[in-house]
């Protein structure tokens, strides 16, 4: 075969490419650990090819099947393989894991009609925000990598006016492509790259109708996230109709942004499917971001189910980022309110839940019988309008629905003859419902909230639309079914400030983590409900073809939106404390978070019940307090690897050797995390150790207070820690004992706080016991 003429070789390549897309060949990631730094890029690529050659019939086939060869920090490659070839590779020396490259999804509430900016309310949530920003030099020497759908570089939020030169450490680049060239980067957008080989292997070439083959953002999500991290202050930014008007600003307005586009529109996909971000593209982005010199990475996406770390592109990429002391913030997911829905749970990342800010967009609904309901809307309409009101199930095309799914205003179900000029009531609502009402000629829509309790996800619909709370649905239902001449009056949106906040967004994913129940996740919560931020002008507010409107700023909800808030604060902390570890920065964020709301009660969930640490983590981030946490729970790269010995027995980095004797492997609960989770108390009692490092005044004395989890006794010894130097470390033991009141297999929650009278270093506790 080596002697075949070139033309044959090329047709063979072509055949291989085609067959590679057939069912037998799928894209796999072959993960080999990290690089020793001793090999040249050519040597690395040769090693990767020789692995492939050992399972492929020829060198040519091996060369043609490779997709990515990871050469910077992460060692491994992705390639088209059959499942037999994948199995054979996984048996080979040096191979840690071989896994199918799977798509992550963006963590907006609807994967397709994603995002939006940092607004005035953000400042309110940052006590002394301005001082902190000044001290941090507005983070102008820090670069945050945003791994997402790209960026809309023309947005005013990304202007580089008056920004100083790009920091000398920066090694990134600006990659040209469809409607994007090096002129689109500036002193604000210092890097922009895109990764689509994994996507194209699954879906074929990017369709220019649905996405730009370049770092340019067609979806809006990446632009929204980047502007939350580091958008400039833009006065009078507002969503369509002037709603939410105020100064738009990122959390770190002078930070440098580096864009890594890994998520691509799935053509013809159902809207819920939206964009796909494949593992092998993600790993390539992490590998480059690490080499480029980012100090913080913001990752607003995740897999729909939890996957073990060694098969999770984000967990692998983040581990090597953290090895270089890069802080990685990830969204927790939007699969709530069910428990154990949380994703991105590795202890080396910051996992961010989503909660409300103290602002609501009120748009009351008045029924013809005089009953007034609490409605919420961000759809602009100028005047109150009164319309005949019909229930969707009564105006459907016969046969288009069943008794199970009627009344939902699903696409193609409403009869134009019965709907024209009327307001339609749909039992639950997001985007498609009002699109269907509009398609059928309806004049307005009343949507029932899809979630129970508080928390309505606002969207800029195209016809007057108001969403009512779920407990109000039966009221409207009863009224419409018993009145042939029902009417409704919708009132225009009024912005209410200072409302009860934060409460947890109903969709925010919940712990305990299925991958590692001995690490408490999420870590913290941050604003993620109806947040205004910059938008792509190639995306409409609803991100559907029927919507032709162009906006510069727009509202979005999701943990996709809360994550970049934390990335912004991490960038400020990085500027303030250049030599803190990424673990110290995470610890500062966690232990300074606030578990209470603006009325002094517990942060609640959307139902109004006190939230548990599995919903809100340690609480809402408090940037100014995080800047001066007093003590930190530090961890080194080696500590994470030792943790992995216990948690999964898998070593993500083969250069590290787990203790030979299992008895020498500490339980995962021992990992020096700023919170404590014990999935199952062994023998009703367990002792774990923690080490705190003094980052406050040299001389200080901390005393512990414990809020006992009901049914358990937590003892901490010693109960007083005396420090005489900055950087001094002190160890303490925590002993947890199940008492008579402990309910088997039900989590109990508590906390402990170290305080020197000035700093409060608070750690939440979650514990269960099965015996
Ligand atoms: C940023 O870096 C430049 C050059 O390295 C230095 O002169 C400047 O003081 C730094 N600014 C801040 C706020 O750290
Ligand atoms: C980038 O594209 C713009 C618009 O097409 C063009 O004006 C500009 O010269 C290009 N810049 C570079 C560096 O190619
Ligand atoms: C709706 O009507 C039913 C039957 O008449 C009644 O039982 C129910 O309480 C009503 N619900 C509301 C919220 O008015
Ligand atoms: C941080 O860096 C500064 C300056 O390089 C050094 O003086 C200080 O000791 C370092 N602190 C720690 C905790 O490593
Ligand atoms: C923690 O417990 C271990 C095991 O009993 C003990 O050796 C150690 O001295 C204790 N540490 C502290 C600070 O009490």
Image (tube, grey):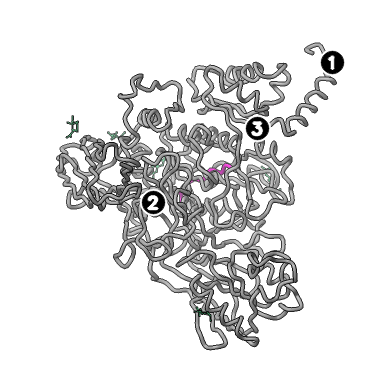
Gap in angstroms between the C-alphas marked 3 and 1: 29 Å
Is 602 inside the magenta-drawn segment? no
Disc nearest the viewer among 3 and 2: 2
Nearest the viewer among 349 and 312 is 312
Gap in angstroms between the C-alphas marked 2 and 1: 63 Å
- Split into 4 quadrants, where in the image is the N terminus? top right
Left or right of residue 376: residue 128: left
Q: Are marks 2 and 1 in contact (CB under 8 Å)?
A: no
Mark 3 lies on a secondary structure that is strand
Q: Which image quadrant shows ligand 5?
A: top left
Mark 2 lies on a secondary structure that is helix
Q: Is mark 1 within 8 Å of ligand 2?
A: no
Question: Counting other residues with Cα less than 10 Å from the Cα at mark 1, is it few (<14), some (14-19), or many (20 or more)?
Answer: few
Nearest the viewer among 25 and 302 is 25
- Disc 1 designates what residue? 5
- Disc 2 designates what residue? 614
Which of the numbered marks, if any, corresponds to residue 27? Answer: 3
The picture places residue 17, in percent across and down from the top left corner, at 76, 29
Would you say residue 511 is visible in this rendering? yes
Relative to 608, residue 166 above or below: above
Residue pushed farthest top? 3
Disc nearest the viewer among 2 and 1: 2
């Amino acid at each position: 075969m080596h002697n075949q003429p070139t033309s044959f070789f090329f047709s063979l390549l072509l055949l291989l490419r085609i067959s590679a897309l057939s069912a037998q060949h799928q894209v796999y990631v072959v993960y080999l650990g990290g690089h020793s730094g001793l090999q040249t890029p050519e040597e690395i690529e040769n090693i990767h090819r020789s692995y492939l050659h050992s399972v492929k019939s020829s060198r040519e086939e091996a060369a043609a099947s490779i997709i990515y060869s990871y050469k910077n920090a992460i060692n491994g490659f992705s390639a088209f393989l059959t499942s037999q070839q994948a199995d054979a590779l996984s048996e080979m020396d040096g191979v840690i894991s071989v896994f199918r490259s799977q798509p992550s999804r963006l963590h907006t509430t609807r994967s397709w009609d994603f995002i939006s900016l940092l607004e005035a309310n953000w400042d309110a949530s940052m006590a002394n925000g301005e001082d902190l920003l000044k001290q941090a030099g507005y983070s102008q020497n820090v670069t945050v990598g945003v791994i997402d759908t790209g960026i809309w570089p023309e947005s005013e939020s990304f202007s580089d006016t008056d920004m100083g030169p790009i920091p000398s450490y920066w090694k990134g680049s600006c990659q040209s492509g469809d409607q994007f060239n090096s002129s689109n980067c500036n002193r604000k957008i210092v890097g922009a790259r895109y990764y689509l080989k994994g996507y194209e292997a699954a879906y074929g070439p990017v369709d220019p109708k649905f996405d730009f083959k370049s770092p340019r953002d067609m979806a809006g999500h990446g632009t929204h996230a980047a502007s939350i991290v580091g958008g400039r202050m833009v006065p009078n930014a507002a969503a369509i109709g002037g709603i939410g008007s105020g100064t738009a600003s990122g959390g770190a307005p002078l930070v440098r942004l580096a864009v890594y586009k890994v998520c691509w529109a799935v053509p013809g996909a159902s809207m819920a499917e939206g964009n796909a971000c494949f593992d092998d593209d993600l790993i390539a982005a992490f590998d480059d971001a690490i080499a480029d010199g980012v100090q913080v990475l913001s990752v607003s996406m995740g897999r729909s189910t939890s996957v073990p770390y060694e098969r999770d592109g984000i967990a692998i990429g983040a581990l090597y980022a953290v090895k270089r002391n890069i802080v990685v913030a990830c969204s927790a997911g939007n699969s709530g309110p069910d428990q154990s829905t949380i994703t991105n749970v590795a202890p080396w990342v910051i996992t961010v839940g989503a909660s409300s800010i103290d602002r609501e967009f009120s748009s009351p609904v008045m029924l013809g019988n005089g009953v007034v309901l609490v409605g919420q809307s961000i759809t602009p309409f100028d005047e109150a309008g009164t319309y005949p009101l019909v229930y969707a199930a009564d105006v459907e095309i016969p046969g288009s629905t069943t008794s199970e799914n009627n009344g939902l205003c699903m696409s193609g179900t409403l009869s134009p003859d019965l709907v024209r000029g009327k307001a339609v009531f749909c039992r639950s609502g997001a985007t498609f419902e009002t699109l269907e009402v509009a398609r059928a000629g309806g004049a307005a829509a009343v949507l029932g909230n899809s979630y129970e309790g508080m928390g309505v996800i606002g969207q800029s619909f195209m016809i007057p639309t108001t969403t009512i709370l779920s407990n109000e649905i039966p009221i409207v239902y009863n009224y419409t079914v018993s009145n042939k001449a029902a009417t409704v009056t919708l009132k225009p949106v009024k912005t209410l400030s200072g409302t009860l906040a934060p409460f947890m967004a109903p969709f925010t994913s919940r712990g305990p983590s299925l991958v590692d129940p001995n690490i408490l996740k999420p870590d913290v919560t941050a604003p993620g409900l109806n947040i205004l931020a910059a938008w792509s002008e190639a995306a409409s507010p609803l991100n559907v073809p029927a919507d032709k409107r162009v906006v510069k700023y727009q509202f979005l909800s999701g943990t996709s939106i809360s994550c970049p808030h934390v990335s912004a604060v991490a960038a400020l902390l990085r500027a303030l404390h250049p030599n803190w570890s990424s673990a110290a920065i995470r610890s500062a964020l966690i232990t300074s978070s606030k578990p209470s709301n603006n009325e002094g009660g517990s942060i609640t969930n959307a139902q109004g019940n006190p939230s548990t640490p599995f919903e809100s983590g340690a609480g809402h981030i408090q940037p100014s307090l995080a800047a001066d946490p007093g003590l930190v729970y530090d961890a080194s790269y080696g500590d994470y690897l030792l943790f992995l010995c216990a948690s999964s027995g898998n070593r993500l980095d083969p250069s590290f050797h787990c203790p030979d004797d299992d008895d020498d492997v500490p339980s995962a609960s021992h990992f020096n995390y700023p919170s404590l989770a014990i999935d199952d108390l062994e023998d009703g009692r367990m002792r774990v150790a923690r080490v705190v490092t003094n980052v406050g005044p040299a001389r200080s004395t901390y005393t512990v207070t414990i809020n006992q989890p009901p049914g358990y006794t937590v003892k901490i010894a010693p109960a007083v820690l005396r420090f005489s130097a900055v950087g001094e470390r002190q160890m303490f033991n925590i002993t947890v004992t199940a008492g008579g009141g402990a309910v088997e297999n039900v989590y109990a929650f508590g906390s402990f706080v170290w305080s020197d009278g000035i700093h409060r270093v608070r750690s939440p506790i979650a514990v269960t016991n099965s015996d």
